[in-house]
Image (cartoon, rainbow, N blue to C red):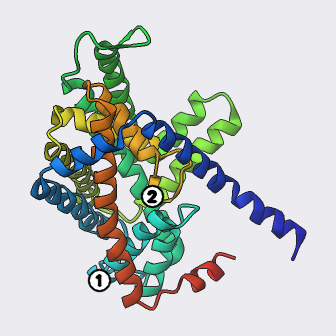
Amino acid sequence: MNPEAANRGARAWIPTVLGIGISLALLFWSLRGVSPQEVWLNVRAAAPLTLLAAVILATLTFPLRLLRWRLLLRQDDDTILPYGPGWHAIAIGFMANNLLPFRAGEFLRTYTISRLARVRFTSALTSVAVERVFDGIGVVATLVLALFTAHLPADLEIGGIRIAATAERAGILCLVILILGGLVVALPTQSENLIRKLIPAPKVADKLVSIVEGLRLGLSALRSPSRLLGVMAWSLTLWLLNGFSFYVGAKAFNLPVDFPGILLMQGLLVFGIAVPSSPGFVGIFEAAVIAGLSLYGIGKDRAVSYALTYHLTTFLPITLLGLWSLAKTPISLGDFRRSRK
């Protein structure tokens, strides 16, 4: 084997090893001091039908992703992406994110759609990158709503910092970020020019401009304002629905937290999974949920019961659906691995 290739392969494993270490450390923190008996009693006391409703709502976010993706990505002849191949690609991709290292799901999704539909791999990959931008806008929008409307205890302090007042300032900051993000999406060329004028460091400016340029190329598929607004609307709907599934799950465990509080917890979770982690975001998921619920005085035993149960029950449907799609399509993980070499 080529020594240079071997070194590249070894370096490629560094983020995964680091992610597994972070996940294990956070999982240890999440479970430290927790009573297994209390967790089991809380799980047994949860309302099964309400929990089932939460799982169904969480799973429905994936068809919404398909509807949004059909606006972002067109086939090579500019026809609409077919439902069947689009769904199989999404299901296989998110299944892979749950089970495989390196966050391979995004690449496997683009590989799948390029095999099942008349779509170039590069076009699909660009569409997924743009999709992440709209996910960010959707999450920040719901986080702004949460930070301005969450009924946090007025006297709650962490490290001497009053949380309610900090949340208001964070809400203003997120609102500014949301507005700037919207302007970049709406006016990418003007944004590139403005970045070069405002950023004195050329390397930093070039990096930011390359990101905006990639966004501009990805947005070229959205040739009409109605499609752009449609993508933004689906993104907001998707993250509100995802938050509502968390809220219904909290109701199954009779947790005293309102919907804005759940959106705040969801924001913490989304920012948390941005760091390296193990497949399925084990540990990071539980730690973010515990941190979010602790703002409402919910103890660790109850928070862990909810986090573990929700994580497991919502993990299974899309993983099983993805495995089913993998079995029903001519997609081979071996071919995918060879295509990346």
Q: Secondary structure at mark 2?
A: helix
Residue 107: x percent and y percent? 52, 69
- Of the two numbered discs 2 and 1 in the rendering, the one whose residue sits closer to the viewer: 2
Q: Amino acid at mark 1?
A: Gly
The answer, for residue 123, to whether it is visible in the render is yes
Q: Residues within 10 Å of mark 2 (few under 14, many from 20)?
A: many
The residue tagged 1 is 84
Q: Residues within 10 Å of mark 1 (few under 14, many from 20)?
A: few
Task: Identify the disc placed on residue 280.
Answer: 2
The answer, for residue 187, to whether it is visible in the render is no
Q: Amino acid at mark 2?
A: Gly
Q: Secondary structure at mark 1?
A: helix
Q: The C terminus appears in which quarter of the rendering?
A: bottom right
Residue at horizontal 16 percent and vertical 49 percent from the top: 46
Residue 270: x percent and y percent? 39, 44
Q: Is residue 89 above or below residue 246?
A: below
Question: Which one is nearer the viewer's eye here, 246 or 260?
Answer: 246
Residue at horizontal 49 percent and vertical 64 percent from the top: 126
- C-alpha distance separating marks 2 and 1: 25 Å
Pointers 2 and 1 in contact (CB under 8 A)?
A: no
Residue at horizontal 46 percent and vertical 36 percent from the top: 32
Residue 165 location, quadrant? top left
Question: Which one is nearer the viewer's eye here, 212 or 47?
Answer: 47
Residue located farthest toward the front when viewing the structure as drawn: 37
Q: Is residue 27 above or below residue 222?
A: above
